[in-house]
Image (cartoon, rainbow, N blue to C red):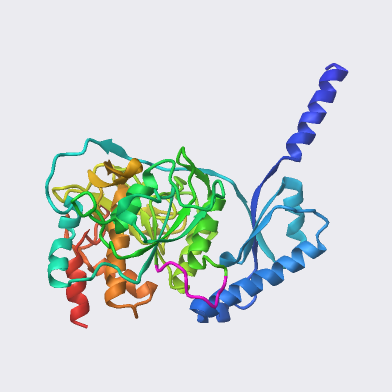
Amino acid sequence: MSILKVMFLSVFLCTFAQAENLYLIVYKEQNLKKLQSLKGKNLNQYLRNQTRVNERQLFSNSRAQISDKKSLWILNATLIRASSSQAQTFYQFSNVAGILPMGKTIRLSVGNFEPLAKDNSLYTYGLVKIGLPQLRTQYVGLEGRGVRVGVIDTGILLRHPDFENRIIKFRDFVNSRPLAYDDHGHGTHVAGTVAGSNKSGRWIGVAPGAELIIAKSFNSRGNTVDADLLLSLQWMADPDNNPETDDGAHIVNNSWNTEEPTLKRDPALDPFCAIIPRLKALNVLPVFAAGNDGPRENTLTPPAACPDSLSVGATDQDDRIADFSSRGPVKWVNQMVNKPDLSAPGKGVNSADLGSQYRTRSGTSMASPHVAGALAIFKQLRPDLNASQLESLIKLSVQDLGPTGFDYQYGFGRLDLMKGIQFLEQQ
């Protein structure tokens, strides 16, 4: 080999070794019993304090100079950008439980676009299926008022008439722009099903009185990285970064998944599976689309596949499970999990679009916002219910379809608002 080739190879290997990537440093829990006993703002403060202490111990004593780091206090962890050799040096610290590689690209499964059918009905078919017209007749004003619903997606069209004066918080994890926008369309459509009104002459949203907290986490091509999604979920729990103020989302819609197969993995080592119970303990209930990889079984991926997730499959106008809707069970390396939890209309759903227009889309992305909106309805009716209680209620708020009881297509059944209302009235 020539001297020139040897020199080139040496430079290449050195450059490759020093390439910086994202890593998640996870710290050891020092007082697990106390951690499990805390809820709400007390838990928020405790998590922040212990992560702050761990970060101080780590970075004040490390020789590695890390300039790009972000606290992921909800997981007692820190996101860093570093070379592999720098990241490895942190294993020497006694408070480090593990270091996970991050930075995986995650792409939206946008589903299918369909032509807008001529329909003069006052409600989209999805709202009719879940019983919204009947609920509106019997419970005037039950529209999710006073409930904060988060949407982690491609953003939202600020001036779409169906969201007038109801976008209360916005954060751009892509371009750091201050005002709400959507350069893709998926997020606007999803938010429309959660909380859109009837400016088109037809009601498109389940909870048009809900307040919207929007995280733009996906770019104009529908791409993001795993780290930004974890940061977005954390932000939803405490947008103003102050545990003393009650400003977090009560419910968060997540019409995305990681497409990471579960068969050879342990959910205990998945950060998305770890963040879900922390969110619930902070009184935030995340809802996840099951995914569009059906009709094969075992096609849900995290976060929908996580043991503690609330995952939603998709049905069509005839109450059949959509062929694309991902099926359970979920097979992890060490356990099997029954998913999805329930289903909702997700095929041929009309909702808001860019240009203050409307569009019909298909996907479990369109199903999960029906459930997020329904949870806002229940939260308005019973503001005392915490995240875990709301989750239990929504699993009872279904019409059983398919095989009797739970099955791997519909879950417990298709969303039915009146079933949930009737259950609450009997309490």
Q: Residue at x 34, y 51 (%)?
A: 190
- Residue 242 versus residue 374: which sits nearer the camera? 242
Q: Is residue 196 above or below residue 386?
A: above
**Residue that lies at the very extreme toward the top in this rendered image:** 2
Residue 293 x %, y %: 34, 42
- Residue 206 versus residue 284: which sits nearer the camera? 206
Query: Is 245 left, or right, of 287 in this rendering?
Result: right
Q: Residue at x 24, y 36 (%)?
A: 114
Which residues fall within the magenta stretch? 242-250
Task: Please say whether residue 415 is one of the residues in the magenta stretch.
Answer: no
Q: Is residue 423 above or below residue 74?
A: below
Q: Residue at x 49, y 67 (%)?
A: 237
Query: Is 23 left, or right, of 126 in this rendering?
Result: right
Q: Is residue 369 visible?
A: no
**Which quadrant of the structure image shows residue 408?**
bottom left
Residue 394 x %, y %: 28, 67
Query: Is 215 left, or right, of 4 in this rendering?
Result: left
